[in-house]
Amino acid sequence: MKQSVRAKRMARNHKRNSKQTKLSLVSLMDIFTILVFFLMLNASDVQVLDNHKSVTLPESTSDTPAKETLLILVNNDAIVLQGKKVTDVDSALQDNQDTISALAKELEYHNQKRQKRAVMQHAVTAPQSDAAGQAITIMGDRTVPYAVLKKVMYTCAEAGYTDVSLAVEQLLSSEGEV
């Protein structure tokens, strides 16, 4: 049976268009591999603490990176532990005691919560870690009176948080390195 010119052309086009084009994923895999390595290497270099608008950190050339610990934020108005307001700075200053009782209660609560979590995970705390003390970071505004920071640090030490770190804004060193 003879086919018309139109039928031959349609068969030829159908045959040409029916072939599937193959997508080469090798170059895409190379790009994604490089991207993954780049992100893995650069993500571990940066340690950022949550900063609050009301706190301007003092500047320093500290070389020690920040650790993931309890965070106390001290600004001109309030003392905040892990995002929860504990007390006012004015009432802490007016109190004649060396410790801040509201902060001590909150630190004890966090200590008990940590101990319950350790028991639930069946983890036994090593005696060396208790001797070294628990870690805590204080973010104090540069305009906060030293008497307030001294009371906060003393309260932390009394509650067993003796590994106290003060958060600072890191300056560039003389060589230009961070």
Image (cartoon, rainbow, N blue to C red):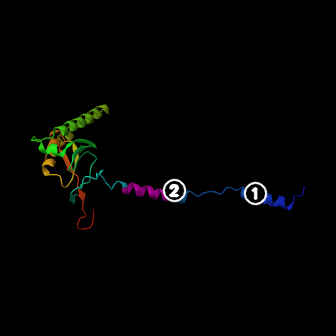
**Residue placed under numbered mark 1 in the picture:** 15
The crowding category of the residue bearing disc 1, from other C-alpha atoms within 10 Å (few below 14, some 14 to 19, many at least 20), is: few
Residue visible at 27% across and 34% down?
Answer: 113
Distance Cα–Cα, label 1 vs label 2: 32 Å
Q: Is residue 117 visible?
A: yes
| Res 106 → quadrant | top left
133 above or below 27? Answer: above
* Mark 1 or 2, nearer chain start: 1
Q: Is residue 89 found left or right of 20 in the rendered image?
A: left
**Residue placed under numbered mark 2 in the picture:** 29
On the image, the x and y values in percent for residue 160 come to 18, 39
In the picture as drawn, the residue positioned furthest to the left comes out as: 96
In the picture as drawn, the residue positioned furthest to the right comes out as: 1
Q: Which mark is residue 109?
A: none
The part of the chain drawn in magenta is 28-42
Q: Nearer the viewer, residue 121 or 136?
A: 136
The crowding category of the residue bearing disc 2, from other C-alpha atoms within 10 Å (few below 14, some 14 to 19, many at least 20), is: few
